[in-house]
Image (cartoon, rainbow, N blue to C red):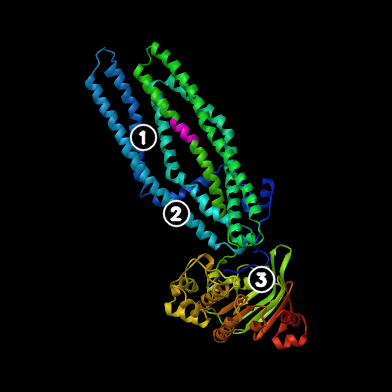
Amino acid sequence: MNANVNTEPHQQQKIPRPRKTSDETNERFVYKDDDAIEKPFNWAQLTRLISYMKPYAKQILPLIGLMMVIGTITKLAIPFLTSLAIDRAIDPQDGNPSLTLLYQITIAVLAMYIIQWVAGIFRIKFTNIIGQRVIYDLRADLFRHIQRLSFNFYDKRPAGSVLVRVTNDVNSLQDLFTNGVVNLIIDCVQLVGIVIILLLINWKLGLAVIVTVPIMFLISTKLRVRIRRAWQEVRIRNSRINSHLNESIQGIRVTQAYTQEEENMKFFDNMNLDSKKSWDKASAMNQGFGPLIEITGGFGSLILFWLGAVLIQQGELTIGLLIAFTQYVGNFWEPINRLGQMYNQLLVAMASSERIFEFIDEKPSIDDEPGAKKLPTIQGNIKLENVVFEYEKGRQALKGINLDVKAGQSIALVGHTGSGKSTIINLLSRFYDITEGKLTIDGYDIRSVTVESLRNQIGIVLQDTFIFSGTIRDNIRFGRLDATNEEIEEVAKAVGAHDFVVQMPGGYDTEVEERGNMLSMGQRQLLSFARALLADPRILILDEATASIDTETELKIQEALKVLLQGRTSFIVAHRLSTIRHADHIVVLDHGKIMEEGNHSQLMQKQGIYYGLIEAQYRFL
């Protein structure tokens, strides 16, 4: 099934407009999903993020844990061995230095460094493996979910805003999973070990040094909320740039046609400047943690050397232990500094995760209701009873539509732009749910059956068809993935596409560019037609399907349709007389209401709205 349906009032091409200031840039690109997410730091959300590591807990985490323990023990042992070398080998209390003991301790220290280095290599290797797997799972979950979201979700968000969630926001979590979580555990374990060792060496000196830590955390607390908001702002600015880039690329023909390249560049420069300023602001706040910790560490060092000297003079501390103490304090401030940076990294990750989970938590407005059953193979009887629909509350697109379509009938929907033609098609495929009334197929309320079983029996051909990157064969097979090459060629011949396909360099295996830019509008339309017919739908929808096809090609399709539409219920949205005049029933719509009904002859005799449309078409021929 080809499910790329345009909604009449929503999917309009936005044309870049010149702006002079960044404030005006912000005003234009304020989308609902771009609002800063103001929530307190949520440990439950962090737990949810970390839960993506659970599937790999038994496979890799034990190895990572073992490497962490080995690395931590060896690192904590080195200062203690240094103190032994000074107090017992270099300057022992008995006054007899021991070179043998010094050599032994030196070899032991060297061995500790080697073990620590090897453990670090394997730890980094394992953490990278689990980190990349987690990112893969998270991105797959996000992409899988956004494919299920309903049309009204995309109506309110530009494509670039959605794109940035799947790419930039997920990528920003890589450091957290590959390094952050493991380093956090290592640093916490090291801190606990160092604090215990410092208190065991000399509890007075240990408490004097450690007392500076709460002061540092109290000062830094005020910065945390500001830093988190700053990184949220960076994500918002990047999202807006991506949105504008997508819009500019899609509308490049319009931009060049109206020679607005320079103005569009100025507009982009303003957005780019806003992004740079927000990044500079967030980065400057990040950098504030490092100097803060260094200053606090400097006060700790002053206390250490002053009180250490006093304790040595009083005989409560040896020179070797003071040097070991100094090393432990150095090792103490190192993880403290990393924890400060880790907190900043966590704030960045939280800003991204909030935006990711905002999408994942978005519920599709169109979904299977509890107890929904699979729609059996249908005949194609369709009935609309007092159907009312609103894209936005208070703005009715359909106003009490009543329509009874028998299986196998061809129904033409006619009317001016915005009259409700495409809206009826969207409701029939359940891309939106009706606001009031009832819509049934073979007596089944379409809200009581599964969405998949409904759409599997509906084929759609659009005026603005979408061609995916890949081969021509793959694009046709998109209608039914298990179709054989013979079936693909058969439907291509039926719609008149076979002749131009075989003339392509690779025939059916010709690679088409993105959106099928190497094909003409008519050729893309024929491929879309073949794609829909391959699905063998019970209900076939042609939404301006022949608008981009020349007269000669249209004649071929008309002949094919006489065979292909037999036994199928069809809805035809078109303005060309040749397309709709043979329809069993023509429905004339205006402002969401049915104004006239009947076949071509009956409506022409009435000389009403339909007659006026046909006369207007002939005048312009």
In the image: residue 452, left or right of residue 76: right
Label whose residue precedes the other's in the sequence (3 or 1): 1
Assess disc 2: are there few (<14), some (14-19) or many (≥20) residues with their C-alpha within 10 Å of its C-alpha. few
Cα separation between marks 3 and 2: 37 Å
Of residues 510 and 417, the one nearer the viewer is 510
Q: Secondary structure at mark 2?
A: helix
The magenta span reads 334-340
Q: Provide the residue designation for mark 1.
A: 72
Task: Answer above or below: position of 440 versus 19.
Answer: below
Cα separation between marks 3 and 1: 65 Å
Select label 1 or label 2 by which is in front.
2
Select label 3 or label 1 by which is in front.
3
Residue 120 pos. (x, y %): 35, 39
Q: Provide the residue designation for mark 2.
A: 136
- The disc at residue 423 is 3
Cα separation between marks 1 and 2: 30 Å
